[in-house]
Amino acid sequence: MSQKPDICHKTMLYCIEASPKLNEIIACGRYCFRDLTKWPKLDRICKAQLNFFQRLIKENSLNPDLIKSEADRLGVTHRTYAQFGLKPQFLDLFQQHFLLIVGKLRIEEKAEHQILIEAWSMLLSFIISRIYLSYANRS
């Protein structure tokens, strides 16, 4: 993350490019900026994503119980946007684009780079699976 501090922002821009519907969902049916790089709401979301990952990784050393509870909390938050059309499948887009960016990071040791990609893949897969459960368990 220190090599690519804008990773969440780039990921979200790629996701919106891949699925323009996501832009409408984030806007919650209201006006959204034409220049997404200057959209305050998207900026807040991306900063929250970065903060989320930094808390899990740097501050809490990937504590499994915290990852689970935070992923569940995130699932409840995401579920509230279902009324605007957010589906958990959009998270697959996030993972795909996030991992593409991680794959392009410059790391000299090829084995270390592969481990980094696999670690991010496992973390994102777990978090996304917990969010999927939140959607499945809604009443």
Image (cartoon, rainbow, N blue to C red):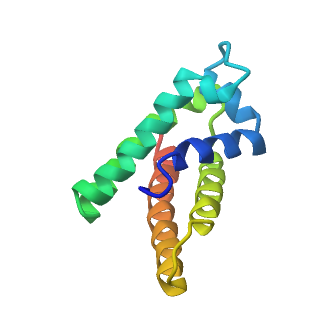
Q: Position of residue 41 (x, y in %)?
A: 53, 23
User: Residue 46 versus residue 38: which sits nearer the camera?
Assistant: 38
Classify residue 108 as left or right of residue 18.
left
- Using residue 117 as the reference point, say whether residue 47 is left or right of it: left
Task: Measuring from the top left, give residue 31's x and y in whole percent.
Answer: 68, 13
Which residue corresponds to the image point at 52% horizontal and 68% vertical from the top-left? 121
Place of residue 123 in the rendered image (x, y in percent of width and height, measured from the top left): 44, 64
Residue farthest to the top, as pictured: 31
Quadrant of the image occupied by residue 23 = top right
- Residue toward you, 133 or 126: 126
Q: Is residue 120 above or below residue 84?
A: below
Nearest the eye: 22 or 116:
116
Any part of residue 109 in sight: yes
**Picture quarter with the N terminus:** bottom left
Q: Residue at x 45, y 72 (%)?
A: 119
Res 127 quadrant in image: bottom left
Q: Nearer the viewer, residue 92 or 1?
A: 1
Above-or-below relation of 109 to 91: below
Whole-percent x, y for residue 135 in the image? 52, 44
Q: Is residue 139 visible?
A: no
Examine the rendered structure and indicate whether residue 138 appears above or below residue 71.
above
Q: How many labels sit on residues?
A: 0
Say which residue appears at 56% left-offset and 69% top-offset. 106
**For residue 87, above or below residue 60:** above
Picture residue at 63% right of the left edge, 30% below the top: 37
Q: Is residue 135 left or right of residue 86?
A: left
